[in-house]
Amino acid sequence: MKKTLLENVISFLLGLFWALLIISALIIFKSFYNISILFAIVVVIASSTFWLLLIIFLEIANIQIEKLKELKKQTKILESLAQDVKTE
């Protein structure tokens, strides 16, 4: 199945955001580890929520695109069935 430009951009951004989440979590943990390990974990969780929200937003957009494609297929099938019923 051929992907549209928007789907390719969304896939690229999903990969980028996952990579940024991991990199930022490692950098933040390493920065705050000297203060306290518990504080470092809390800060990493708090900062990771931003990236996770962006990832969820892109996943929702991807699901909506797939849903639209499926609805277009179903509409085409229903229209052909309606024409078959009219001709009979």
Image: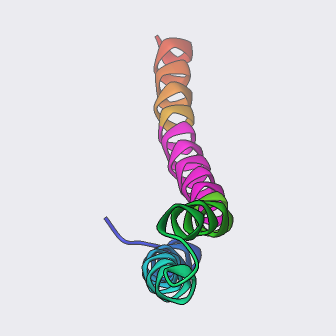
In the depicted structure, whether residue 16 falls above or below residue 68: below
Residue 56 image offset from top left, x and y in percent: 59, 55
Q: Nearer the viewer, residue 62 or 48?
A: 48
Quarter residue 9 falls in: bottom right
Farthest-out residue, left = 1
In the rendered image, residue 61, in percent from the top left (x then y), is placed at 63, 56
Q: Which residue lies furthest to the front in this view?
A: 35
Where residue 49 sits, quadrant-wise, is bottom right
Q: Position of residue 47 (x, y in %)?
A: 65, 69
* Viewer-side residue, 41 vs 77: 41
How many numbered badges does the structure rendering display?
0
Query: Which residue appears at 52% of the width and 61% of the height?
Result: 38
Q: Does the magenta stretch include residue 1?
A: no
Residue 72 forms part of the magenta stretch: yes
Q: Which residue is located at x 48 percent, y 68 percent?
A: 37
Name which residue lies at 56% across and 30% down.
79
Considering the image in quadrants, where does the N terminus appear?
A: bottom left
Place of residue 21 in the rendered image (x, y in percent of width and height, measured from the top left): 51, 76
User: What's the coloring here?
Assistant: rainbow
- In the image, 66 versus 78, the foreground residue is 66
Establish if 66 lies above or below 18. Answer: above
Secondary structure of the magenta portion, mostly? helix
Q: Nearer the viewer, residue 66 or 21?
A: 21
Which stretch is magenta? 54-73
